[in-house]
Amino acid sequence: MHALRNGITSSVRSLFTIVYPPLKAAAFVSTLPPNMKTATFAMGCFWHPDALFGCQKGVHRTRVGYTGGSLHNPTYRNLGDHTEAIDIDFDPEVISYEKLLKLFWKNHDSTETHKRQYRSVIFYRDDEQKSSAQESKKEMENNSSRPIVTTIEPFNKFYNAEDYHQKYYLQTHHVKLFISLGLKPNELVDSTIAAKLNGYVVGENTLDAFNSDAELRSLSPENRSYVEKMIARGKQAHC
């Protein structure tokens, strides 16, 4: 059975190669800004935030993982007291932390209480982020008829989730496109193009944004056409 599965996998990969010729991962390496900063949010399940933030202009990398607890080296099956979260590497000259906060509040229910794994948290990394987070929470509280349960906590240590969680939609729902990029699963946390495509293929940004995205100019015509069709379907991300 193992040999048969490997044979099937090899055949499928060969077929995908014909449809979408693999490109060298180096073709998609982008120059990271020297002033890049990191935001860390927890918004329930981390697959959707990975897609949401990954395709925003000014965001260069995303990774999902576990933070906020004391267990050393947590895993999905042994999470301990940690929370599912996302790290977002961004250029503050292109997208502000305040804009990221607006996306945070808009794209999950901050009034719904969940168990610790799926709670709503802003993990601040410096005093400036702490102040911005507190101000944004006050604004939400002033405009909400229900109590805001989101907490604001200092960032400590972030543990990357397993490879199969990274860019989940791209890996599992858009396999042909993923294979054509020539990326290995363990390279997804550092790939700008994977972060962007993981969001675009589930409709987390517009066609105009996609067409103007300089990071994606190396895509083949076939891949561009495929992503455009996915964007036209509207938002498809869910956990």
Image (tube, grey):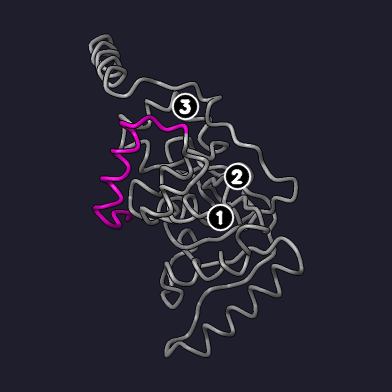
Q: Crowding at label 3, few (<14), some or many (≥20) Cα neighbours within 10 Å?
A: some
Q: Are marks 1 and 2 in contact (CB under 8 Å)?
A: yes
Instruction: Check residue 227 for magenta coloring.
Output: yes
How far across and how far down the image is residue 180, in percent? 37, 26
**In the figure, residue 206 lies in which quadrant?**
bottom left
Q: What stretch is highlighted in magenta?
A: 218-239
Q: Is residue 8 above or below residue 68?
A: above
**For this view, does 1 lie left or right of residue 35?**
left
Disc 2 and disc 3 in contact, CB within 8 angstroms = no
Taking the spot 47% from the left edge, 26% from the top edge, the residue there is 184
Q: Name the residue under label 2.
A: 159
Q: What residue type is labelled 3?
A: Leu
Helix, strand or loop at label 3? It is loop
Q: Distance between the residues labelled 1 and 2?
A: 10 Å
The amino acid beneath tag 2 is Tyr
The residues tagged by marks 2 and 3 sit, at their Cα atoms, a distance apart of 21 Å
Q: Position of residue 208 (x, y in %)?
A: 39, 54
